């Protein structure tokens, strides 16, 4: 299970620009590397800034506000590599968050699918099978070994 393609695009773009800039820098072209990093900062950073501003208009103030300030500061101070690193950290964190959320949601769905549909209510010495949703507070129920794993077979 992977993160949504849009969630992976931000960190991939930031990382690609960082690496491309280092490649150009190692080719002994530091001015061109600065240009690559600047373009990358605007490509990766502007969406973060707009997303944060949109959230602020809705009253949502989160950690991305700090990232936005750092990105805007890097733009203003002409420090594109630093800004790109912040953009990579922000978008990478968001991608990991989406991935973890999807995994947790899937785990909850699987657990719900295994939930018993039938309960065995004890009425004195007698065991009565009833729908699980009809169990009430105070009912005594019998849980047999292994029933959770067979719940979907009922």
Image: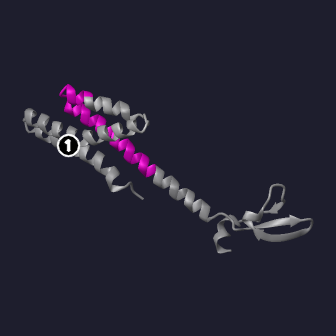
Position of residue 129 measured from the top left corner of the image (x, y, whole percent): 79, 71
The residue drawn where x is 69% and y is 68% is 117
Q: Is residue 145 visible?
A: no
Where is mark 1, residue-wise? 17
| Residue situated furthest bottom in the rendering | 154
Q: Residue at x 51, y 55 (%)?
A: 105
Q: Based on the picture, tell me whether residue 23 belongs to the magenta stretch.
A: no
Give the vertical position of 52 relative to 16 (above or below). above
Residue 112, above or below 154: above
Q: Secondary structure at mark 1?
A: helix
Q: Is residue 92 visible?
A: yes
Give the residue at x 13% y 34%.
34
Q: Position of residue 40 (x, y in %)?
A: 19, 41
- The front one of 90 and 1 is 90
**What residue is shown at x 30% (from left), y 40% (from top)?**
50
Q: Quadrant of residue 24?
A: top left
Q: Main secondary structure of the magenta part?
A: helix
> Which residue extends farthest right?
124
Quarter holding the N terminus? bottom left
Q: Quadrant of residue 19?
A: top left
Quadrant in the picture for residue 15: top left
Badge 1: how crowded within 10 Å, few (<14), some, or many (20+)?
many
Quarter of the picture containing the C terminus is bottom right
Rendered view: 120 above or below 40: below
Q: Position of residue 121 (x, y in %)?
A: 82, 65
Residue placed furthest toward the top: 77
> Could you say which is closer to the camera, residue 97 or residue 149?
97
- Residue segment shown in magenta: 73-100
Q: Is residue 30 left or right of residue 17?
A: left
Q: Is residue 115 left or right of residue 93?
A: right
């Amino acid at each position: 299970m992977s993160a949504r393609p849009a969630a992976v695009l931000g960190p991939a773009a930031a990382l690609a620009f960082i690496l491309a800039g280092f490649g150009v820098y190692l080719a002994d072209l530091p001015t061109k590397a600065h240009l690559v990093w600047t373009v990358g900062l605007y490509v990766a950073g502007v969406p973060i800034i707009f997303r944060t501003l949109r959230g602020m208009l809705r009253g949502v103030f989160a950690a991305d506000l700090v990232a936005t300030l750092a990105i805007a500061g890097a733009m203003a101070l002409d420090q594109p590599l630093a800004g790109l690193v912040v953009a990579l950290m922000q978008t990478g964190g968001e991608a990991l968050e989406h991935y973890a959320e999807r995994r947790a949601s899937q785990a909850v769905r699987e657990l719900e699918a295994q939930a018993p549909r039938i309960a065995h209510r004890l009425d004195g010495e007698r065991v009565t099978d009833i729908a699980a949703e009809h169990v009430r507070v105070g009912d005594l129920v019998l849980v047999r070994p292994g029933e959770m794993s067979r719940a979907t077979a009922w």
